[in-house]
Image: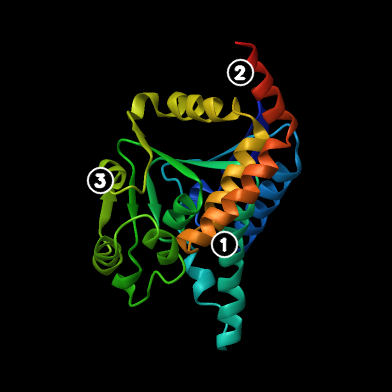
Amino acid sequence: MIEYGVSAGIARITLNRPEKRNALNAELIAALREGLDRAAADADVRVILLRGTGKDFCAGLDLKDLTKGEAVLDHMASARTLVDLYLAMRRNPKVIVAAVHGRAIGGGAGLATASDLVVAAASAELRYPEVNMGFIAAIVMSMLRRQVSEKQAFEIVALGESVPAGTAKERGIVNHVFADAEFEARALAYATELAAKPASAMALTKDMLYHIDGMSFETAIHAGLYGNALARMTPEARRGFETFLKK
């Protein structure tokens, strides 16, 4: 269901269900969770590069899974696996970079926005088409809303139309757009640049950034106090201070 490999501090996790456009069924979600947990526990991994095989990054939830079950609790249990996946991505101490090509649809767009950073091929597009099926983008909306304005988020999920990579970058959903011909190389170079940063500083930065979300200004400042003090005590910070003072 996934391909997993580690090289030069980068764990490459590739969705490998191309015949279904990497649609997220229970088995693929479980395999992805396992890969993310494996990377989190590996001291040699600094960055996770999330990709998809075939024509598309991810076509979202497998519709067959959406129709399983009769009672609301059955559907809640199924939906919870996706919620737990997105939360695990936020809690993962390693930086996750989604490399989006082709289409990222519904839950697949959620997979991109749940990542810490997103790079996209110029021809890529994101789409939240749930409303067109009488459904709603209930889970993925929470991440989209944190990255675009309220009215932009409403328009994206209400129209269900494709958002081209360039537009997604303008709206703050995508960090960088690379030409199709050089997308793979540029995405890897971007991940490599991140992997060269001090691992403890990156992990603490990610943890701090997401924890202050929703805090009042004063509470966030105080949270930063503890983060500041903690970061000073890491071996990497001490080496960095010593190196700077010697210059």
Answer few, some or many: residues within 10 Å of disc 1's Cα (few below 14, many 20 plus, some between 14 and 19): many
Say which residue label 3 marks: 167
Say which residue label 2 marks: 244
Between 240 and 20, the one lying in front of the other is 240
Q: Is residue 69 above or below residue 209?
A: below
From the viewer's perspective, is the residue at label 1 or at label 2 nearer?
Answer: 2
Amino acid type of the residue that numbered disc 1 sits on in the rendered structure: Asn
Q: Residue at x 53, y 30 (%)?
A: 191
Between 245 and 54, the one lying in front of the other is 245
From the viewer's perspective, is the residue at label 2 or at label 3 nearer?
Answer: 2
- x and y percentages locating residue 82 in the rendered image: 56, 65
- x and y percentages locating residue 40 in the rendered image: 70, 45
Q: Is residue 12 among the parts visible in the rendering?
A: no
Q: CA distance from mark 2 to mark 3?
A: 40 Å
Say which residue label 1 marks: 25
Identify the residue at the far bottom of this view: 71
Asked whether the beta carbons under mark 1 and mark 2 sit within 8 Å of each other, the answer is no
From the viewer's perspective, is the residue at label 1 or at label 3 nearer?
Answer: 3
Q: CA distance from mark 1 to mark 2?
A: 50 Å
On screen, residue 96 versus residue 118, left or right, reads right
Q: Residue at x 60, y 49 (%)?
A: 225
* Tag 1 secondary structure: loop
* Tag 2 secondary structure: helix
Amino acid type of the residue that numbered disc 2 sits on in the rendered structure: Phe
* Tag 3 secondary structure: helix
First along the sequence among labels 1 and 2: 1
Question: Image quarter for residue 145?
Answer: bottom left
Q: CA distance from mark 1 to mark 3?
A: 29 Å
